[in-house]
């Protein structure tokens, strides 16, 4: 499979403005169908294809993509209206192919070397995207037009990508093993919880979300294909992501959507309140009923719901939601309330992010006081954990998720996190158990793990 160069050149001849405004920011976005074999080949070479990529899977829409390298980047969120995309996208029914990918860390006052490969806030236009929608597969290339770059140079660059992929060797899938070396222990955790409960008793805060960390050594070569496949199998309802920058890989299976946008229609959710899964269907349903009627868990959930609705009301109309239901994951289940709204004219994706993140589900209430307590008690940098990842495009579509159930892999070291909301009625023992269940989402990927 090669680039359809004749069609690309015809497209460029017709589409490039003449003369080109030298002050304009022109990005070529060219799309062509590809085979399933090429898409799968690109996926299988994910270990060695680049030092920068984002793999993304949205099972709810049967949609996935692999975005490689950077055509253009910015340490702040790129303004879509400032970029002129010259594209043949309208030839295809592809409203959701990304233009810009984004990430933002959880806001704290720490800056650990562990996360140095990732900026606090970052956005970039990739060079190439392999995109799958149901049973259709596409290649998208992005290139800055200008700086005396010729058509042949543009074509040569992307043909090399395809040649490298076609000539790569398949990778043997294997399950890595891990030894746990350190973690937030039960004694330290109890002190953190009791301190927070006193703050709640003194009416300084209503809620704070505290997290634990676990670190370990990975004892064999990390096969990202295996990890991704297992995450997809184990968490079919979650967003799967692998985000690589230089020597660092951030990956996970997040059940929490910050929002998705479909032109002016916003879909978001309150996801808070947790209980374990049952070993049988009857036990599982009993636990679901218990969660739906637990005043402490309902209070925590409603706190998140109220925050989202209140903040959305400032920039949207027609906010709609119903009573909470249950979202079931492999090891735990959550109280879940889907929310829809219509974005008011003149509002942007950046406004949405700033209004909603971080929610009380990952921070607390009130936000600033909860952040102060988190920074005081947590002796590590959360980095992208409880931060955000996502994408958006100039068609008015996008997805942004909260990066939970996630881990950082760096130089054969694994660092993972799990948090829970501390409210009136919380106990150190119960919250420790909850974090253990959440940590399993990543620890279960590895064999021979030792957790003591």
Image (tube, rainbow, N blue to C red):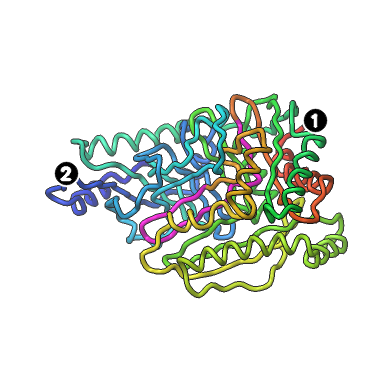
Residue at the spot 53% in from the left edge and 63% down from the top edge:
311
Q: Secondary structure at mark 2?
A: loop
Quadrant location of the C terminus?
Answer: top right
Q: Position of residue 295 (x, y in %)?
A: 79, 64
Q: Position of residue 69 (x, y in %)?
A: 41, 37
Q: Secondary structure at mark 1?
A: loop
Between 332 and 176, the one lying in front of the other is: 332
Q: Is residue 243 left or right of residue 219?
A: left
Callout 1: few (<14), some (14-19), or many (20+) C-alpha neighbours within 10 Å? few
Between 270 and 447, the one lying in front of the other is: 270
Residue at the spot 27% in from the left edge and 38% down from the top edge:
154
Specify the farthest residue to the front: 202
Q: Position of residue 333 (x, y in %)?
A: 75, 57
What secondary structure do most residues of the magenta stretch adopt? strand
Q: Is residue 242 left or right of residue 393?
A: right
Q: Which residues are magenta?
A: 389-409
Q: CA distance from mark 2 to mark 1?
A: 59 Å
Q: Is residue 145 left or right of residue 221?
A: left
Between 213 and 378, the one lying in front of the other is: 378
Q: Is residue 193 left or right of residue 55?
A: right
Displayed quadrant of residue 212: top right
Q: Which mark is residue 22?
A: 2
Residue at the spot 44% in from the left edge and 57% down from the top edge:
351
Displayed quadrant of residue 328: bottom right
Closer to the chain start, of discs 2 and 1, is 2
Q: Any magenta on residue 79?
A: no
Quadrant location of the N terminus?
Answer: top left
Q: Which residue is mark 1?
A: 450
């Amino acid at each position: 499979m090669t680039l359809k160069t004749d069609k690309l050149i015809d497209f460029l001849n017709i589409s490039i403005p003449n003369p080109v405004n030298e002050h304009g920011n022109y990005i070529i976005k060219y799309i062509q169908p590809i085979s399933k074999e090429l898409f799968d080949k690109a996926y299988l070479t994910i270990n060695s294809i680049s030092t920068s990529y984002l793999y993304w899977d949205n099972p709810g829409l049967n949609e996935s993509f692999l975005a490689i390298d950077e055509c253009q980047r910015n340490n702040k969120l790129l303004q879509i209206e400032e970029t002129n995309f010259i594209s043949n996208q309208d030839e295809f029914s592809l409203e959701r192919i990304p233009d810009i990918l984004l990430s933002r860390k959880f806001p704290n006052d720490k800056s650990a070397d562990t996360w140095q490969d990732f900026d606090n806030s970052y956005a970039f236009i990739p060079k190439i995207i392999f995109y799958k929608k149901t049973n259709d597969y596409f290649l998208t290339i992005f290139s800055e037009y200008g700086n005396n770059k010729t058509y042949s140079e543009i074509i040569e660059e992307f043909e090399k990508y395809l040649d490298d992929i076609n000539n790569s060797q398949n990778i043997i899938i294997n399950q890595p093993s891990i030894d746990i070396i350190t973690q937030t222990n039960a004694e330290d955790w109890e002190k953190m919880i009791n301190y927070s409960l006193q703050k709640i008793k003194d009416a300084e805060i209503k809620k704070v979300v505290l997290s634990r960390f676990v670190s370990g050594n990975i004892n064999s070569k990390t096969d990202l294909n295996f990890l991704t496949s297992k995450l997809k199998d184990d968490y079919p309802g979650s967003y799967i992501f692998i985000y690589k920058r230089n020597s660092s890989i951030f990956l996970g299976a997040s059940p929490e959507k910050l929002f998705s946008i479909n032109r002016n229609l916003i879909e978001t959710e309150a996801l808070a309140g947790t209980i374990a899964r049952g070993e049988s269907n009857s036990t599982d349903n009993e636990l679901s009923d218990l969660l739906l009627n637990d005043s402490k868990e309902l209070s925590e959930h409603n706190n998140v719901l109220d925050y989202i609705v209140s903040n959305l009301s400032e920039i949207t109309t027609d906010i709609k939601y119903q009573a909470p239901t249950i979202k079931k994951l492999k090891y735990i289940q959550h109280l879940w309330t889907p929310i829809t709204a219509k974005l008011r004219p003149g509002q942007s994706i950046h406004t949405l992010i700033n209004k909603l993140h971080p929610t009380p589900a990952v921070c607390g209430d009130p936000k600033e006081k909860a952040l102060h307590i988190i920074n005081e008690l947590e002796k590590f940098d959360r980095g992208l954990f409880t931060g955000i990842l996502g994408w958006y495009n100039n068609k008015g579509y996008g997805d942004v998720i909260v990066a939970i159930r996630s881990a950082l892999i760096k130089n054969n070291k694994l660092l993972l996190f799990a948090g829970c909301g501390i409210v009136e009625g919380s106990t150190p023992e119960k919250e420790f158990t909850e974090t253990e269940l959440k940590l399993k989402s990543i620890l279960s990927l590895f064999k021979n793990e030792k957790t003591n």
